[in-house]
Image (cartoon, rainbow, N blue to C red):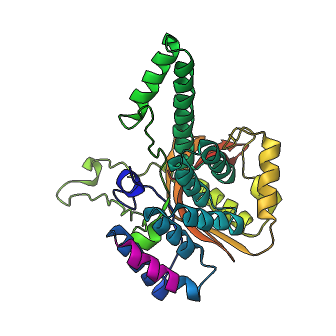
Amino acid sequence: MTLSRFFLPRLCAFAVLFMLVGGARGDAIQDIGNLLKQGQQAQALEQVDKYLADKPKDAQGRFLKGLILTEMNKSSEAIAVFQKLTEDYPELPEPYNNLAVIYAQQKQYDKAKQALEMAIRTHPSYATAHENLGDIYARMASQAYDKALQIDSSNTSAQTKLSMIRDLMGSNVRHGQSSAVTKPATIVAALEPKMTTKPTEVKPVEARIPVTKPVEAAPVVAPTVPPVKAATAADVTKSVEAWATAWSKKDVKGYLSHYAADFKTPSGESRAKWEADRAQRIDKPGVISVSVEGMQVEAEGANKATARFRQLYRSAKLKTSSRKALVLVRQDGKWLIQQERIGN
């Protein structure tokens, strides 16, 4: 089964990379993406090569070229593109993920596993890579049970386990038949440039007292947002914005001070290791800018809340926009981050 039939019924279905583009650059990428969506791979490849001739370092154009080559079954060329992207932009998990897609199609499951582990190491909250890694493990388990049955066809335990995996993976998983089991990353900005989420405007509700009734008889109208929750939302928003400011200033100590003592590290590593990794990333040379948009706060009692927003990250090499959720708890009068998730 080809990549386009199995993975890309709609190119934006598994979108995770959202690079900010504008003007002529955005239009060019969008046009190339549309050609790919329409199945015109040769024309898309010709256009992306012209685009990259003027902008050879452009990460989005290079990533799109990798997708086109994958669609055209030019696996070795696609691997070269994604591999070079991992070298030039090691902070991006998507090229690793798409390398895993190609390796899985080639039955190189060990390489696919290693690529996905790198994607998760780069971005522990990358759900697609976690799901894909589970698929790879299932495929490797299927191969192992097949081998066990070749050695001992009476092994009922292996037969049962193999049957369970085949049921889980669906009818495409059959003995001796290969199918890709992972989802590729695609580019939202190139294909769906109007997917910017705008915060909902909340209009205040006015309590009106009918003039025909005395003031004493006026009904009591509860405010739309309880005062406690309104204060909570303001305090949480202020804390999240301070967190983003410390990150932008590359103030590692200030940045880390926004995390609670019981913060759940994304991949379960120790707090010390997580802090060391974050400090190393933030301290990299170059200016960075982190801002938040469309903040929405849901209070869960007086001391816990979830903040959902769009995070805009800019550096000399990378511009991204992604949905993010922070679970915060109030400790010693401060709102601190207990958990963070991407895409929620």
| Residue 119 horizontal/vertical position (percent) | 63, 52
210 left or right of 183? Answer: left
- Residue placed at 42% from the left, 83% from the top? 27
Does residue 135 appear in the picture of this structure? Answer: yes
- Residue placed at 77% from the left, 75% from the top? 286
Residue 42 on the magenta span: yes
Does residue 292 appear in the picture of this structure? Answer: no
In the figure, 62 relative to 234: above or below? below
In the figure, 307 relative to 84: above or below? above
**Would you identify the image quadrant in which residue 45 lies?**
bottom left
- Residue placed at 53% from the left, 21% from the top? 150
| Residue 28 horizontal/vertical position (percent) | 44, 83
| Residue 275 horizontal/vertical position (percent) | 79, 50
58 left or right of 288? Answer: left
Depth check, front residue: 334 or 313: 313
**Would you identify the image quadrant in which residue 195 lies?**
bottom left
In the figure, 54 relative to 223: above or below? below
In the figure, 282 relative to 262: above or below? below
Residues drawn in magenta: 40-50
| Residue 187 horizontal/vertical position (percent) | 48, 66
Depth check, front residue: 204 or 104: 104
Magenta region, mostly helix, strand or loop?
A: helix
Residue 179 on the magenta span: no
